[in-house]
C-alpha cells in the first residue's frame, strides 16, 4: 500500500490530500500501541486538568505564579490534543488520511502551542525574578494588569511565528508523494515531500527556531542568574532553600522543553542515517513530554498546589497558604537576606 502511494508522483501536480504514516517500521505492531498511547493521553488530560482546576477553585492560589502554572498546563493539554488523536487514528489503520487544510491546521496548533509554552516560561521567569529579587515590590509590580499584558504578548509572539510558517508552507507544491512518514503535520515533514526550490523555506524555519531559542535562552539565563545570586544572599537557610526549590522546578521544566527540542532539531537536520521511526519517536517525546512531566513537577514540587491536590483527591487535611501568609513570606525573605 505504501509503495502504491509513493509511486503516484508527478512534477505537474500538487497533492491536496495526504496519508500520515507514523512509525512505518512497526507495521503490524502499531495497533498494539493504541492502548498505551490512549492511556498516556488520558493521563495528560487528567493530570493537567486537575492542577488547573485546583488553582482555579482555591482563592489562596490566585497569585501570579500559580496562575501562570495553570496557563502553562492548559497549553500543554491543548498541545497533546493537537497531536495524540490523529496519532491514535493512524495506529488503527496503515495510513491516516488528511487534507492539506487539515494538515496546515494541525501544524498551526502544534507550533502555536509550543511557542506559547516558551513564552509562558519567560513570563514565569519574570515572576520569580520579581518575587526573589524585589519581594517588597512584588504585590505592586505583579498585578493582574501586568499578567494580562504578559498573556497578550505571549499570544502575539506565538502568532507572529506560527502564522508565517503555515502561510509559507501552504504556498509550496507537494508533488513528490502523498505519503507523509510522520504521525503529525510538522514543518520539516511537509517540506520533505514538497518540490521546487525550498531554500528560503528551510532557511526561514531554521532562522525562526534559532532566533526564538537564542532570545529566550538569553533572557532565561540572565534572569535566573540574578535569581540564584539573590537567593544565595538570603541569610536564612530555610528561606534560601525555599527560593532555590521554587526556581529548581522552573529550571527543570525549561531544561526538559529546550533540550528535547534541540535534540529533535539536530537529528532531523543533520543525522540523516537515523531511521524514520527514531525521528518520529524523538518528535513524539518533544511534543508530549511537557504535558506528561509538567503536572508531576509542579504538582509534587510546589507545596501549596500539592496540599490542595492531596486534600481534593484523598481528603487529607492541610492548612492552605493564604495570600496574607504568602505576602508575609515575601517580606520575611527580603528581611532575612539583608546583610547583618
Image (cartoon, helix red, strand yellow):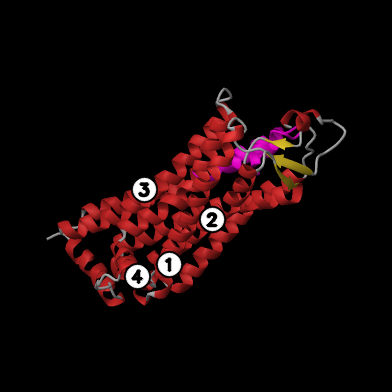
Label 3 vs label 1: CA separation?
Answer: 19 Å
Residue furthest out toward the right? 12
**Picture coordinates of residue 324 (x, y %)?**
27, 77
Circle 3 residue: 252
Quick one: quadrant of the N terminus? top right
The residue depicted at 35 percent of the width and 70 percent of the height is: 312
Residue 162 visible in the displayed image: yes
Give the labeled residue for mark 1: 67
Q: Is residue 235 visible?
A: no
**What mark, if any, has residue 116 been given in the picture?**
2
Using residue 299 as the reference point, say whether residue 94 is left or right of it.
Answer: right
Across and down, in percent, residue 233 comes to 21, 54
| Residues at circles 2 and 1 in contact by the CB criterion of under 8 Å | no
CA distance for labels 3 and 4: 26 Å
Residue 96 as seen in the image, left or right of residue 330: right
Mark 2, secondary structure of its residue: helix
Residue underneath mark 4? 312
Q: Nearer the viewer, residue 140 or 27?
A: 27
The residue located at (43%, 59%) in the rendering is 47
Is residue 192 depicted above or below 238 in this figure?
A: above
- How far apart marks 2 and 1 lie (CA) works out to 15 Å
**Mark with earlier residue (2, 1):** 1
Q: Secondary structure at mark 4?
A: helix
Quadrant of the image occupied by residue 52: bottom left
- The answer to whether residue 321 is above or below residue 287 is below
Spot occupied by residue 247 in the image (x, y as percentages of width and height): 32, 54
Stretch of the chain drawn in magenta: 185-213
Which of the two labelled residues, at mark 3 and mark 4, occupies the earlier sequence position?
3
Magenta-drawn stretch contains 204: yes
Residues at circles 2 and 4 in contact by the CB criterion of under 8 Å: no
Amino acid at each position: 500500500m505504501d509503495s502504491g502511494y509513493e509511486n503516484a508522483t508527478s512534477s505537474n501536480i500538487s497533492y491536496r490530500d495526504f496519508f500520515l504514516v507514523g512509525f512505518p517500521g512497526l507495521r503490524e505492531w502499531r495497533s498494539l500501541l493504541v492502548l498505551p498511547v490512549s492511556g498516556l493521553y488520558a493521563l495528560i488530560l487528567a493530570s493537567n486538568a486537575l492542577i488547573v482546576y485546583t488553582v482555579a477553585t482555591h482563592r489562596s492560589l490566585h497569585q501570579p505564579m500559580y496562575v501562570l502554572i495553570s496557563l502553562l498546563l492548559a497549553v500543554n493539554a491543548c498541545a497533546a490534543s493537537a497531536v495524540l488523536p490523529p496519532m491514535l487514528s493512524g495506529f488503527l489503520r496503515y495510513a491516516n488520511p488528511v487534507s492539506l487544510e487539515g494538515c496546515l491546521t494541525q501544524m498551526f496548533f502544534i507550533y502555536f502551542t509550543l511557542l506559547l509554552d516558551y513564552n509562558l516560561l519567560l513570563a514565569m521567569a519574570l515572576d520569580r525574578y520579581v518575587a526573589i529579587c524585589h519581594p517588597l515590590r512584588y504585590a505592586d509590580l505583579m498585578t493582574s494588569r501586568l499578567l494580562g499584558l504578559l498573556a497578550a504578548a505571549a499570544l502575539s509572539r506565538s502568532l507572529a511565528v506560527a502564522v508565517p510558517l503555515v502561510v509559507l508552507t501552504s504556498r509550496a507544491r507537494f508533488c513528490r508523494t502523498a505519503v507523509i512518514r510522520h504521525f503529525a503535520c510538522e514543518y520539516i515533514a511537509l517540506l520533505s515531500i514538497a518540490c521546487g526550490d525550498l531554500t528560503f523555506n528551510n532557511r526561514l524555519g531554521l532562522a525562526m527556531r534559532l532566533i526564538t531559542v537564542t532570545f529566550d535562552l538569553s533572557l532565561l539565563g540572565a534572569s535566573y542568574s540574578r535569581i540564584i545570586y539573590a537567593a544565595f544572599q538570603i541569610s536564612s537557610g530555610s528561606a534560601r532553600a525555599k527560593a532555590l526549590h521554587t526556581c529548581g522546578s522552573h529550571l527543570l521544566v525549561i531544561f526538559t522543553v529546550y533540550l528535547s527540542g534541540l535534540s529533535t532539531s539536530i537529528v532531523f537536520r543533520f543525522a540523516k542515517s537515523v531511521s524514520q521511526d527514531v525521528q518520529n519517536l524523538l518528535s513524539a517525546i518533544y511534543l508530549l513530554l511537557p504535558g506528561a512531566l509538567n503536572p508531576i513537577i509542579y504538582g509534587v514540587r510546589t507545596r501549596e498546589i500539592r496540599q490542595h491536590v492531596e486534600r481534593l483527591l484523598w481528603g487529607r487535611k492541610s492548612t492552605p497558604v493564604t495570600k496574607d501568609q504568602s505576602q508575609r513570606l515575601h517580606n520575611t525573605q527580603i528581611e532575612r537576606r539583608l546583610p547583618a
